[in-house]
Image: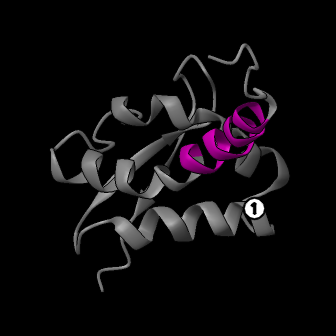
Amino acid sequence: MSDERKPVWPWIVALLIGLPVMYVASFGPACWFAATTGVGYRVGPSRPLILYWPLGWCAETWGWENTIGRTVNWYAKAFLPHDGSVGLPVRSDGTSWRPIVSDGR
């Protein structure tokens, strides 16, 4: 048996790149889940989307008409059902949120 250890740094690099990518990629399906399970934004933010408040905060801070805001809005709408809607939290405590409503396509 050899006492040589395999390097750990490739795993660290993969996690540092992969986890943020998976976080952002899972945002659209989470919007679909929130809209189809009936936990849309009737009276406040969608509870399943509270994990995605940093995306809402970035879009709110830099403007919904900016590239980041338009991208967040587009990606959320891409997964919404025909008549779906969700409330995207823009603060970590869930007191501020933005409604995202399907275009009806």
Location of mark 1 (residue): 68
Q: Position of residue 53 (x, y in %)?
A: 59, 34
Q: Is residue 2 left or right of residue 37?
A: right
Q: Is residue 94 left or right of residue 44?
A: right
Does the magenta-highlighted stretch encompass residue 20? yes
Q: Name which residue lies at 84% across and 52% down.
A: 62
Q: Is residue 30 above or below residue 94?
A: below
Count of marks placed on residues: 1
The amino acid type found where label 1 is placed reads: Ile
Whole-percent x and y of residue 26?
A: 46, 50
Q: Residue at x 67, y 69 (%)?
A: 70
Q: Quadrant of residue 41?
A: top left
Query: Which quarter of the rendering shows the N terminus?
Result: top right
Where is residue 105, by image quadrant?
A: bottom left
Instruction: Give the x, y percent position of residue 57.
Output: 70, 39
Farthest-out residue, bottom: 105
- 28 lies left or right of 23: left
User: Which range is magenta?
Assistant: 10-23
- Whether residue 15 is visible to the viewer of this picture, yes or no, is yes
- Residue located at (78% from left, 39% from top): 13
Going 81% across and 31% down the picture, which residue do you hit? 9
- Mostly what secondary structure, the magenta segment? helix
Q: Quarter of the image holding residue 5?
A: top right
Q: How is the image coloured?
A: one colour
